[in-house]
Image (cartoon, grey):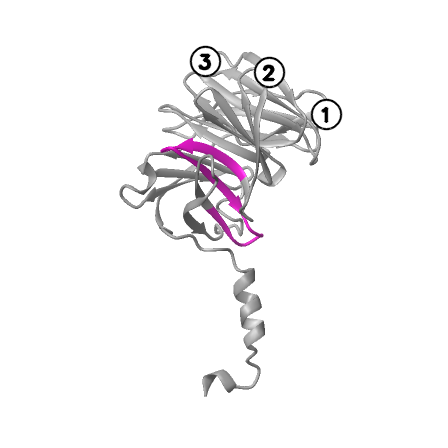
Amino acid sequence: MALRKPGFCLSGLLLLLLTLPPVAAGQSSASLQDTINLDGKLYHVQGLGLDNDHFWVTSVDTANHRGYLHQFNRATGKFERQIDLSDGSRYHPGGFSIQGNSIWVPVAEYKPNSTALLEEIDKRTLAVKRKFIVSDHIGCVAVHGDTLIAGNWDSRRFYVVNFQGKQLQVFDNPETNRYQDIKFAGGMLVASGVFNHKNGAVDWLAWPSLKLVHRISFGLTDRGLPYTAEGMAILGQNLYLLPENGPSRVFHWLIEPGFGTR
């Protein structure tokens, strides 16, 4: 009988299954549509955003303790301009979100349990419109109405703050997925992250319960990095992932019909 073959261990199989990333009800798939090369100097990439004309990327120059927000032409991938976001010991920009003409970016100390600035940057002029301090490392930010959802180091905790920096709520992350970039889309928190060095996923979380509604699992790029390791942006059924340091590529995926808009 198959279950009695030498070397089979039922308890070992059970342990293996328990250590695999959980699969959500309603798991879906995505197909790779194209890959866009970003033609410009980037450091350790962090977050990704887009509008009709541009890709926006945050990256951190760890050697020189500087953090940047870069703008690229969406049609050509050519670099256009950038702003230095560094603020002393705070030089780690993370996942960010765009609302209208504002870009909300966290700039944190490069260690957990530290501090961060949340900055609102004018998309047209790159001028800082406002900023305030949060008493934790903030690695990613999503905009929800007139509030910000801010994930700390690996998004083990989510803070909800208003645009003046007042903390309104705090939620623990019930998932093991270590989210690096988050966006609010289709009434849900869309969060991209990794379980380990080989497996990652984009999760759709009901808000504010944080119940896992959908999950798309991803493997590795041909450079051996998880697709979901760093930047993520979503527009309807179009999902964009930016996992690699310079020379960087944006991977454009198409989610199954209707999935990204539910």
Q: Earlier in the sequence, mark 1 or mark 3?
A: 1
Q: What element does badge 3 sit on?
A: loop
Question: How many C-alpha atoms fall within 10 Å of the one at disc 1: few (<14), some, or many (≥20)?
Answer: some
Q: Where is residue 176 in the image (x, y as percent from the top left)?
A: 56, 49
In the image, the segment drawn in magenta is 180-201
- Mark 2 vs mark 1: in front: 2
Dot 2 crowding, Cα within 10 Å, few <14, some 14–19, many 20+: some
Vertical arrangement, residue 169 with respect to residue 127, above or below: below
Mark 1 highlights which residue?
Answer: 89
Say whether residue 41 is visible.
no
Q: Are marks 2 and 3 in contact (CB under 8 Å)?
A: no
Instruction: Please name the residue that numbered disc 3 is placed on.
Output: 124
Distance CA(mark 1)–CA(mark 3): 27 Å
Left or right of 235: which side holds 120? right
Q: In which quarter of the image is the N terminus?
A: bottom left
Task: Determine which quarter of the picture holds residue 43.
Answer: top right
Say whether residue 67 is left or right of residue 4. Answer: right
